[in-house]
Image (cartoon, helix red, strand yellow):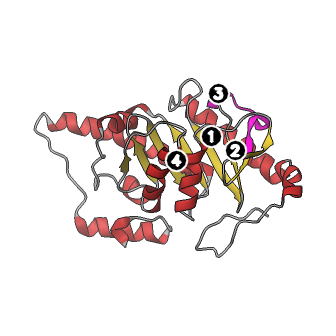
């Protein structure tokens, strides 16, 4: 059975030998994952978190292999046969279409954060607005944000698809599961592809709420933050879920 890669479980990813790759790519386990990735891609498109052929998704399926979305294909209209299997250097080893051009960013996250099993990159409009302005969303406002995401990092702008972008994002993934990419979008990692997608939903909803909060603030209604004793309770819950947060170190 495919391993999760969670440190807490003590399980490790399998190693797939070159002669086993074609059979592995056609296995029932990967067919299920391919369909799940296509479903998440469609949900991203339905929510207008991606436009054109933007965005990309990946799942680490072996110590030496990653399943990812293709380049130049709308995430709302992908098919399982479109997906690509790549090695940890970014070289395609199986698949019907070329892998996403931004895979190096995903690989940098997997290298920096052993807990990361999947990554989702998208362009949710409100959160991307924060990224364009270089604004880190405020914290201590809403429990779900604190437990499942926490403080969001802001990475400097680097050209999409480049090695430099991966180098800018990777180090941040050790302490942050959701990262704003300046003038670009958002990338989130999770314990599975749906978990990474949920973080995208949570962040976009939170950023919308913060805009409304700022507007009400102009009317003299300043935001109320969660008191520190209750924040510590939220961080304790987060720690039991195995979600890293620099505030718990």
Q: Are marks 2 and 3 in contact (CB under 8 Å)?
A: no
Between marks 3 and 1, how big is the CA–CA gap? 17 Å
Instruction: Kindly state the secondary structure of the residue where label 2 is placed.
Output: helix
Q: Is residue 6 above or below residue 184?
A: below
Disc 4 versus disc 1: distance between alpha carbons?
10 Å
Horizontal relation, residue 76 to residue 179: left or right? right
Judged from the image, the secondary structure of the residue bearing numbered disc 1 is helix
Is residue 68 one of those drawn in magenta? no
Mark seen at residue 154: none
Instruction: Please provide the residue range marked out in magenta.
Output: 73-85
**Which residue has dot 4 on it?**
198
> Residue under circle 3?
72
Question: Does the image show residue 190?
Answer: no
What is the secondary structure assignment of the residue under circle 3? loop
| Residue located 59% across and 72% down the image | 7
Cβ atoms under marks 1 and 2 closer than 8 Å:
yes
């Amino acid at each position: 059975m495919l391993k999760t890669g969670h440190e807490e479980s003590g399980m490790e990813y399998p190693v797939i030998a070159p002669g086993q790759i074609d059979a592995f790519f056609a296995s029932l386990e990967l067919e299920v994952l391919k369909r799940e990735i296509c479903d998440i891609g469609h949900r991203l498109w339905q929510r207008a978190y991606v436009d054109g052929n933007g965005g990309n998704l990946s799942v680490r399926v072996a110590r030496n292999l990653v399943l990812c979305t293709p380049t130049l294909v709308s995430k709302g209209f992908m098919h399982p046969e479109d997906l690509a299997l790549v090695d940890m250097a970014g070289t395609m080893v199986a698949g019907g279409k070329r892998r996403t051009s931004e895979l190096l960013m995903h690989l940098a996250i997997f290298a920096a954060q052993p807990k990361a099993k999947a990554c989702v990159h998208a362009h949710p409009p409100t959160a991307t607005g924060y990224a364009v302005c270089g604004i880190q969303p405020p914290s201590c406002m809403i429990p779900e944000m604190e437990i499942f995401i926490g403080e969001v990092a802001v990475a400097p702008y680097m050209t999409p698809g480049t090695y430099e972008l991966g180098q800018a994002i990777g180090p941040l993934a050790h302490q942050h599961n959701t990262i704003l990419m300046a003038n670009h979008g958002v990338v989130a990692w999770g314990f599975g592809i749906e978990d990474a997608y949920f973080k995208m939903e949570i962040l976009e909803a939170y950023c919308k709420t913060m805009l409304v909060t700022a507007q009400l603030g102009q009317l003299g209604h300043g935001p109320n933050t969660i008191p520190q004793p209750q924040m510590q309770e939220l961080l304790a819950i987060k720690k039991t879920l195995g979600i890293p947060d620099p505030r718990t170190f």
